[in-house]
Structure formats: C-alpha cells, structure tokens
Image (cartoon, rainbow, N blue to C red):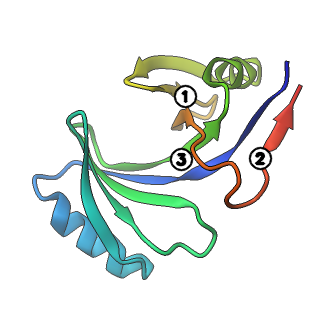
Amino acid sequence: MAHRSRLAGFIIDCETGDIDAAAQFWGAALGLPPGEKEDDEGALYVGLEKHPSQLYVAVQKVDHPSRVHLDIETDDLDAEAARLEALGATKLKFVKRWWVMQAPTGHRFCVVQMHHPELGPPPNVWE
C-alpha cells in the first residue's frame, strides 16, 4: 500500500534554560518572528513564523547537547520508518507520536505525522 512523505521542517534543539531568549536569537538570525510558546506534553517549542516555503521551523528546549534536526512528515509513520530503515537508517525510539531515527551518517531526525498535505509542495508517493 502506498504512503506519502516529505520534508516537514527543521527543529533547532537548544540546551537552554531560557527558550524565549533562544527563540528571539534564532528568529532574528533567520528573519522569522517567534510565535507563541507551545507545550506539547512537557516538550517546549517556539515556532518561527512566516517561512516562505511553509516549512515548519521551531526552537525546542532540550536536555541533550544543542543541534539542529529535521522532521520528515508522513501519512503512515510505520511505513515511512520501514522505508527509511531499508535505506540504512535506524529507529532509536518512539516518543509520544513520532519516531526518532538516525541516518547512517549519524544525523538524528524525526518521522512525524503529516498534518496539512494540501499545503506546500506535494508529498512524495512511495509504493
């Protein structure tokens, strides 16, 4: 059965005690105004708004070393994770509603649920 996926956006993981200051810095650096703080079951995010490509760009408060990771959105989490495993990625853990994975290059990324397939570029269709 076919499923769809595409790049959803970039998350700027910040090991910080002040997520608002981090969002202010990254918003100013990227020319994207910070939005409202979001608390997703204890995970704190501040979305950076008005990205021209409609990518989701956010600052996230984390307790691991700061880094940037990307999100791949899909309409079938398990099918997309399996496709990426076949390419050499590794599932690290399932967190709340998404897979944290690692590429063969060592980069971490997340596979998340697609929310607005009608917005942005059309998703890839995988058989």
Query: Quarter of the image containing the C terminus?
Result: top right
Q: Secondary structure at mark 2?
A: loop
In front of the other: label 1 or label 3?
3
Q: Nearer the viewer, mark 2 or mark 1?
A: 2
The first of marks 2 and 3 along the sequence is 3
Q: Which amino acid lies under the numbered mark 1 shown in the image of this protein? A: Gln
**Location of residue 32 in the rendering, given as x and y in whole percent from the top left corner:** 42, 77
Q: Which residue is mark 2?
A: 123
| 77 is higher (above) or lower (below) than 7 | above
- Amino acid on which disc 2 is placed: Pro
Q: CA distance from mark 2 to mark 1?
A: 22 Å
User: Which residue in the protein does label 1 denote?
Assistant: 102
Say which of marks 2 and 3 sits in front.
2
> Disc 3 marks which amino acid?
Leu
Dot 1 alpha-carbon crowd within 10 angstroms: few under 14, some 14 to 19, many 20 or more: some
The percent position of residue 26, horizontal first and vertical second, equals 34, 71
Which of 50/115 is in front?
A: 115
Q: Are marks 1 and 3 in contact (CB under 8 Å)?
A: no
Q: How many marks?
A: 3
Disc assigned to residue 70: 3
Q: Position of residue 121 (x, y in %)?
A: 75, 59
| Residue at left offset 44%, top offset 18% | 94
Q: Who's the residue at 64% across and 17% down the image?
A: 78
Residue at 51% from the left image edge and 58% from the top image edge: 56
Residue 3 left/right relative to 65: right
* Chain-order first, disc 1 or disc 3: 3
Vertical relation: 53 (above or below) 13: below
Q: Is residue 20 left or right of residue 13?
A: left
